Image: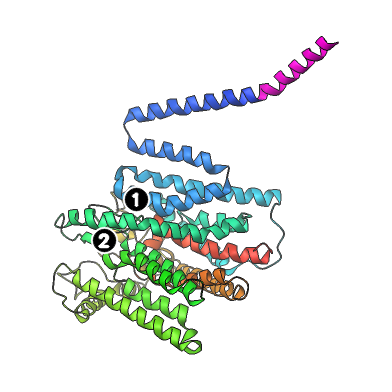
Amino acid sequence: MAEVIDKISVRTRLSQAWPDNRRTVATYGAAILVSLSAGVISATGKFDLMAIFIGLIAGVAVASSRKALLWFVIIGGLIIVGTAQLYLPGSKYIRYIIPLATYVLVFHGAMDYIGKKTSSNSSSIPTPILWAITFIGITIVSAIINISDIGVVVMGMKGYFQMWALFFGLIFIKWTPKTINSIPKGVLLIAFLQIPFVLHQYFVLAPQRVGMMSGIVAVDVVAGTFGASIYGGGANAVLAAFMMIVVACILALWKNGVLSNIKTASMSLLFLAPVFVNEAKISILYLPIIFTVIFYKEILKKPIRFLISGLVMVGVLAALMTALTLSQQSGKHKTWADLINFTIERQTASTSERQGQFSELSRLTALTFWGKEHLSANPVYALIGHGPGASRVQDGGLDLASTLAEQRYNGLQIGYTALSALLWDTGILGLIAVLGLFISAFRTASWLSHYYRHKDIFKASIFDGLRAGIAVLLLSLAHKDFFAFHFPYQTLVMLLIGFLVVSRFQISQGSN
């Protein structure tokens, strides 16, 4: 009898161990297969293939975890893509991996909906979602109506919507409050990470660019992790906008008594330091906008605090203006007035006045030129544009000879800013939809700040700062054309707006 029992127990242990053995065999088999694949790809000597392979492995590793996948996308969009562009230019195709990961986020959201994990919610859809869907619809209609070169359409759609899946992934997944609350802290860590990159770019890379090629501004390579080229320009304006948004949140925390004077001053100076050295002139406007949005109520309610913060803002603005004036390599601009007059003249001069100086349009004339060209044109083009990608020009070796900008307006830079690019690509309706997206995000941040005012002063301060941050991003549409194609910029925009919307959702679902 004892022998029978022993035999049964042995068989039971073997049957229980066999599944573990199968998993072990499968694990080792997968590891061997991955190792062999890595060896074959490495043997080709093609860095692009190696980068894609590594990215795919990393993507598969984190795809099963929503939180890990979310941070994989955020870090990839705000850090990996930009640094790879500057330090590993041969790995530019790695940017295709991050958007694929964002669609996995959307897949998780779809599974939540199909599996009915999300609680039913009878509240209305937040306005930013409606504006986002409206812009997508307008862009699709414009693409279909104006389609003549499928390559241009694909390039244009890809340019606009590289990271929009991050937005929809954020709002459609049932995130825990802990995960959403970790986003501001993660963004702060990313801001700290900019400092070593800025130091290297300013003290090592910028001196290497002096005299390298005509027309290169040496310090625009100081773009942190937001992308630059050693032989071309850089997204220094995106770095400036990002740092200003972080500073806005710090000032809001100080205004509400969450941060002390010493911590506020030290952190603000640290995060403003890159703005002082990378010559992003738009920062001169960002600072007063942040100050006005954050402190407009304190002007009457707390005049002493307003006076102190106002004096600090004026001092920082004066230092920034001095830094921009002294950094001009030509030496022609000795005073603030010289720099301001030069900037105004360059951005408002007509095309005829710019002959012999600058061949392309300015930020202002890009808009007036669009209006002039559409006065007698087919009104359909004015309403929905000439199709996504119509305003794009040669970039990174892409053959865009069939775009409207290359065929009819070669050399004019009709898509100088996001505003002009949107008008040419998606028309007045597309521009209205994008402006509606940003304005509704601003109002959502205001609502959230008011909601948390007496519940959680830390959250209220963050949303107060993000309200100013959305204002900064809205102004950036009139400065550069990053909204139409720039990967890190789009990641930042979609992350912030998505964070606002999902925070609003969690309140309506009672999970804040």
Compared with 73, 433 (above or below) is: below
Quadrant of the rendered structure where residue 459 is?
bottom right
Of callouts 2 and 1, the N-terminal one: 1
Q: Secondary structure at mark 2?
A: helix
- Residue 197 in percent (x, y) is at 32, 54
- Residue for point 24% across, 52% down: 230
> Which amino acid type is shown beneath numbered disc 2?
Asp
- Is the residue marked by circle 1 packed among few (<14), some (14-19), or many (20+) residues within 10 Å? many
Any part of residue 376 in sight: no
- Residue for point 54% across, 67% down: 131
Quadrant of the rendered structure where residue 14 is?
top right
**Magenta-drawn segment:** 1-19
Q: Which residue is mark 1?
A: 83
- Residue 328 in percent (x, y) is at 18, 69
Q: Which residue is mark 2?
A: 220
Q: Is residue 127 magenta?
A: no
- Is the residue marked by circle 2 packed among few (<14), some (14-19), or many (20+) residues within 10 Å? many
- Residue 161 in percent (x, y) is at 46, 56
Any part of residue 135 in sight: yes
Near-viewer residue (167 or 2): 2
